[in-house]
Amino acid sequence: MVQKALPFLLMRGGTSRGPYFNRADLPEDRDTLSRVLIAAIGSGHPLNIDGIGGGAVVTTKVAMLSLSTDAWADIDYFFAQVSVEDKQVDYKPTCGNILSGVGPAALEMGLMAPAGDETEVRIRAVNTGASIVAKVQTPNKQLRYGGDVAIDGVPGTAAPIELQFMDVVGGATGTLLPTGNPVDVIDGIPVTCMDVAMPVVIARAADFGLSGYETPQELDENKRFYDRLEPIRIEAGRRMGLGEVHASVVPKFGLLAPPRGSGAICARYFTPWKCHPSMAVTGGQCLASCLLTPGTVAEGMAALSMQNPERIAIEHPCGKIDIIVDYAIESERFILKSAGLIRTARKIAAGELFIPARIWS
């Protein structure tokens, strides 16, 4: 069987993993592109046995990079979420964890050159329009992956990658609170529908009869909970102006509970049909913003310092993620200036990935 070779990098970005491509090496039209990505990942099998996916939503993600067409940015980052089993590709969301590897990948691909001991990469997230500055360690103009920074959900340590997110409010819907309300009641459950980095429907775990401290496995085995959650998410998507979201991973869903340890809040994040094993970067920004916004379902739940910038530690199943939020409150209205955090990334493999030529010759 004749096959098509595609240059690629396989990288871990934050707590996710997937192939990074040069957009110029992929088909332009969306239908063919989707077929190529489905073949590359091996979607259609629970183990992605015929591709390089890992059988989990955090290992079936794809980053596609190109020189930016935006005057501000260096790199355009186009993201795709490929499903594990049902051969679907969603281009609506972005992924902040995979974003962690965009700076190093851009340097590896030669899309830009190291600038000194630290290289600043200005990134435009094509899917949402967000602007992000990534600071990558390049001592002596050499990309460095090794370091002493640990992030919960990833074994070992690596070099820090500092991410600063701007213009992340309303990327999908045009506004912080797409329904116009800090709280909506859907099917008897109070929720906050918020759009910061990612549209998320946020609720209190207790309102579902949960503690909020359940493991991802316990939640995923709770069919009654998902049967309750999904209709609420679908109706929330409609109210947020996202249309019919039955087959879309947007909006996501988040559950909040009081902190168990030293964090500001405890959270479980849904992708949306499975519980995230740790915490999405984009989701973390949205949940952190919810804690600071007056009148939301999170009001009174979090242990906050009330300083600005506010450092918010969100407890998740693997530990904690720290979000640094620079914000203002004007006339009871939350204004996000920027959100930052530290991630890590690592190149795992590089070479050619083969797909059947009948898919794209």
Image (spheres, helix red, strand yellow):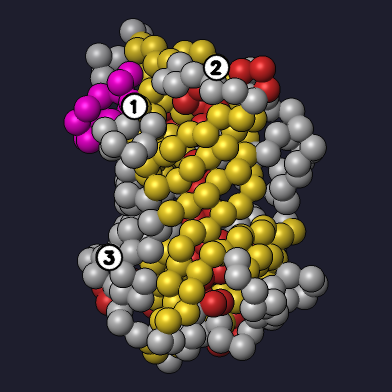
| Number of marks | 3
Badge 3: how crowded within 10 Å, few (<14), some, or many (20+)? some
- SS for dot 1: strand
Main SS of residues in magenta: helix
Task: Name the N-terminal-most of marks 3 and 2.
Answer: 3
In this view, the residue in front, 223 or 304, is 304
CB under 8 Å between discs 1 and 2: no
Image disc number at residue 350:
2
Question: Residue at left 33%, top 19%?
Answer: 25
Residue that badge 3 annotates: 174
Which badge, 3 or 1, is on the more N-terminal residue? 1
| x, y percent for residue 273 | 47, 61
Q: Nearer the viewer, residue 234 or 115?
A: 115
Residue 293 screen position, x and y as percent: 49, 79
| Residue range highlighted in magenta | 23-37
Q: Are marks 3 and 1 in contact (CB under 8 Å)?
A: no
Q: Amino acid at mark 2?
A: Ala
**Residue position marked by numbered label 1 in the rendering:** 67
Q: Position of residue 52 (x, y in %)?
A: 52, 28
Q: Residues within 10 Å of mark 2 (few under 14, many from 20)?
A: some
Q: Nearer the viewer, mark 3 or mark 2?
A: 3
Tell me the SS state at disc 3: loop
Mark 1 crowdedness (10 Å alpha carbons): few <14, some 14-19, many ≥20: some
State which quadrant residue 212 falls in.
bottom right
Q: Amino acid at mark 3?
A: Gly
The question of residue 63 being in magenta is answered with no
Q: Is residue 35 rendered magenta in the image?
A: yes
